[in-house]
Amino acid sequence: MKVPEHKPRALTPQDVRHIVGDLDDAKIAAILATDATVEELEEAAAWASGESDVMGDLERPLEGVVATVYDILMTDEEFLEDRD
């Protein structure tokens, strides 16, 4: 008998706002379009918030969907200002 794979649920706009704060609708739509998981969004937010020392300790490179979401976050001035 084959065990069904656990498929992460799709992100919602509420998930994005909860994890990274209030972004404009276009940025949220861009993040949702990446099909990122909650974990990938959290990792991208950690990188964007300057927690790269933590990510470096995990020896995880910034790549794939995480890198795409990171790029979206880094183009948002309000997100960056909130992190200063």
Image (spheres, rainbow, N blue to C red):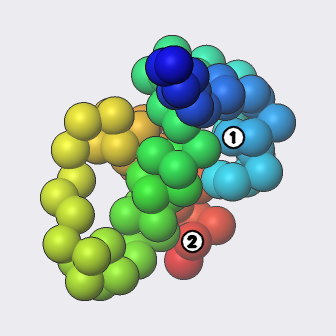
* 55 up-or-down from 38: above or below: below
Q: Residue at image x 17%, y 58%?
A: 61
**Mark identifier at residue 58:** none
Q: Classify residue 83 by image quadrant.
A: bottom right
Callout 2: SS: helix
Residue 18: x and y, percent? 78, 51
Q: Residue at x 40, y 77 (%)?
A: 51
Q: Amino acid at mark 1?
A: Val
Depth check, mark 2 against mark 1: the one in front is: 1
Q: What's under tag 2, amino acid-wise?
A: Arg
As rendered, which of 55 and 82 lies closer to the eye? 55
As drawn, the residue found furthest toward the front would be 1
Q: Residue at x 58, y 65 (%)?
A: 81
Q: Residue at x 51, y 19 (%)?
A: 1
Q: Quadrant of residue 65?
A: top left
Residue located beneath label 2 in the image: 83
Up the image or down, 15 lies above or below 25; here it is: below
User: What x and y, as percent, mark residue 54?
Assistant: 35, 82
N-term-proximal mark, 2 vs 1: 1
Relative to 56, 33 lies left or right: right
The kind of secondary structure element at disc 1 is: helix
The answer to whether residue 26 is above or below residue 36 is above
Q: Which residue is mark 1?
A: 16
Residue 77 screen position, x and y as percent: 52, 50
The percent position of residue 40, horizontal first and vertical second, equals 46, 46
Q: Residues within 10 Å of mark 2 (few under 14, many from 20)?
A: few
Please state if 59 lies on the left or on the right of 23 as rendered: left
Question: Alpha-carbon neighbours of circle 1 within 10 Å: few (<14), some, or many (≥20)?
Answer: many
- Asked whether the viewer can see residue 55, the reply is yes
Q: Nearer the viewer, residue 5 or 41?
A: 5
Q: Residue furthest right?
A: 14
